[in-house]
Image (cartoon, rainbow, N blue to C red):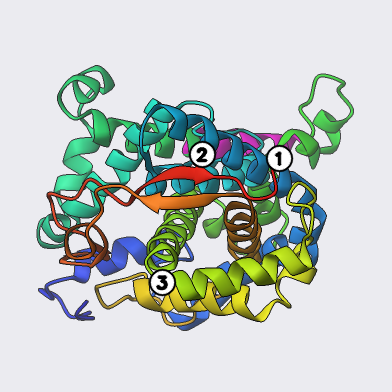
Amino acid sequence: MDIVKDQGGQFKWEIDRMHRESAFSTISHDMHRLRRSAISSYFSKSSIADLEPFIHKRVELLCDTLRSQSRRAPVDVHALFLAYANDTVCAYSFDYSMNLLDDPEVASNWKMTINAIASLTPLIKQFPWLIPVVRRIPGWLLRSALPKLERLLSLQARMNLEATKAIQNHQDATDPKKSESSQVQTTEQNPRFLQQILESNLAASEKTAERMGQEAFSIIAAGGETVARTLTTLTYYLITNPPILAKLRRELQSAQPDPSTPLPFQELEQLPWLTAVIKESMRLWGVMASRSPLVSPTPLHLAQTELYLAVAAVFRRFDLELYDTERLRDVESTRDCFTGEASKGSQGVRVRVVGEPGQ
């Protein structure tokens, strides 16, 4: 992305908009550092360690869903892993779940929504005024004409509403007069992620409902897609490289004799083959096809934990085979949509469960 700040610069509007919103897309190093510092402890290794039993439960649901879906039809692993990642980050950060793992159709619709928005990115870069225009379209019309976009805007609207409620609860709790009333909503009822921002040292201008809502939205959208794409890439390349898969499976079987007894992240991250395949999958996907304005990324320990726990469980428990999946059509990035996208004719990386070792 060209960084042109003078009047008339091609991407000036887009850069200014991103600068006002989430830490993920902040250009200024100093501003990014401030915004990231406000939430860094929330995603610290120690904080995620306390959450690990919760993630293990999500992994169990992931495995149950993979097993049950495969009995009916080939499984789109991108949709499956996106459901797992989004449900996890939503429940951890905002105390609610999108329940994507419980409903394959809803999960598939959410994947199509994310893909559709990615496909629109090149257009939005050139015509950014389309965003406020679309936001003015009534919800009922969007649901009918542009259902994929409506689902995304509905999530953003929900995050804005959650931020508004959190701000009001925080103000009431810190008001001596109102805090004495038993009817005041306490800050304990606020989503933990939003409360972390409100209790930070950020300026008041950084704690508006719009800014916090956008931060929350970016955590869900970016966090879910990053984990899902990495797991999808990993699944394809492991299945198509049997010697590597065999070495990983032997390592997991040695470390985890009973597949139903999961290992903690602290032990999993010490396994060399598991670590290698995860890092290589991240390298192969590469996350972004476009140049990013982000200049000081901070890795999220939540994503790392999700990756290690999911890979260990899926490839310790299941023998998978690809179904009608081609590398050039379904895996390789052929389109620049901010993230690299497969060809338009792709049906995704699909698999069948052909066995469960140790069961």
Residue located 17% across and 39% down the image = 133
Q: Position of residue 88 (x, y in %)?
A: 60, 45
Q: Where is residue 350 in the image (x, y as percent from the top left)?
A: 34, 47
Please name the residue that numbered disc 1 is placed on.
Answer: 171
- For the residue pair 311 and 147, the one nearer the viewer reads as 311
Q: Is residue 143 left or right of residue 220?
A: left
Please name the residue that numbered disc 2 is placed on.
Answer: 66
Secondary structure under the numbered disc 2 in the rendered image: helix
Main secondary structure along the magenta-highlighted residues = helix
User: Given contact means CB atoms under 8 Å apart, are the residues at marks 1 and 3 in contact?
Assistant: no
- Looking at the image, residue 118 lies above or below residue 45: above
Residue located 65% across and 81% down the image = 272
Q: Earlier in the sequence, mark 2 or mark 1?
A: 2
Please name the residue that numbered disc 3 is placed on.
Answer: 241
- Looking at the image, residue 109 lies above or below residue 334: above
Residue located 24% across and 28% down the image = 147
